[in-house]
Image (cartoon, helix red, strand yellow):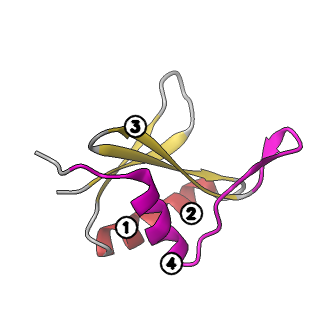
Amino acid sequence: MAQRIRAASVEDFLRSQGYECSEFEGGDWDPGVRVAQAGRRVVHVFWDGPGEASHLDTITGELRAGGYHVVGTQQDHGGRRRLEVTRP
């Protein structure tokens, strides 16, 4: 079973890799990475802005190199792509 994981830990890791976090300003998200807690053992990572697929691919490799387990998923009904991140 996966270990507990905190969104703040994943966000800190991504910031240490040079990523900026997106912020909601003026009715839209600024480009950058967004991390959300999805449960005690799952964190979702989104890319806000252009190049979503390529950025998520790059982030997947960096998270895996950092010891995280990463699976690309998509929200229901053709929604946003996201990464489902856990700790093995």
Position in image of residue 54 (x %, y %): 56, 62
Pick the residue in front: 65 or 72: 65
Q: Nearer the viewer, mark 1 or mark 2?
A: 1
Looking at the image, residue 3 sits to the left or right of residue 56; the answer is left
Q: Are marks 1 and 2 in contact (CB under 8 Å)?
A: no
What amino acid type should be assigned to the residue bearing mark 3? Answer: Ala
Task: Say which of marks 1 and 3 sits in front.
Answer: 3
Residue under numbered circle 4: 17
Distance between mark 4 and mark 1 Cα atoms: 10 Å
Q: Is residue 37 left or right of residue 2?
A: right
Report the amino acid beneath label 4. Answer: Gln
- Location of residue 46 in the rendering, given as x and y in whole percent from the top left corner: 54, 49
- Please report the residue visible at 26 percent of the width from the left and 43 percent of the height from the top: 41
Q: As shown in the figure, which amino acid type bears the numbered disc 1?
A: Leu
Secondary structure at numbered mark 2: helix
- Residue bearing mark 1: 63
Residue under label 3: 38
Number of numbered markers: 4
The residue at which mark 2 appears reads as 55
Q: What stretch is highlighted in magenta?
A: 4-30
Lower position in the chain sequence, tag 3 or tag 4: 4
Mark positioned earlier in the residue sequence (2 or 3): 3
Q: Distance between the residues labelled 2 and 3?
A: 21 Å
User: Is residue 8 magenta-colored?
Assistant: yes
Mark closer to the chain start, 1 or 2: 2
The image shows residue 3 at horizontal and vertical percentages of 18, 51
User: Residue reaching furthest top?
Assistant: 77
Under circle 3, the secondary element is: strand
The answer to whether residue 36 is above or below residue 12 is above
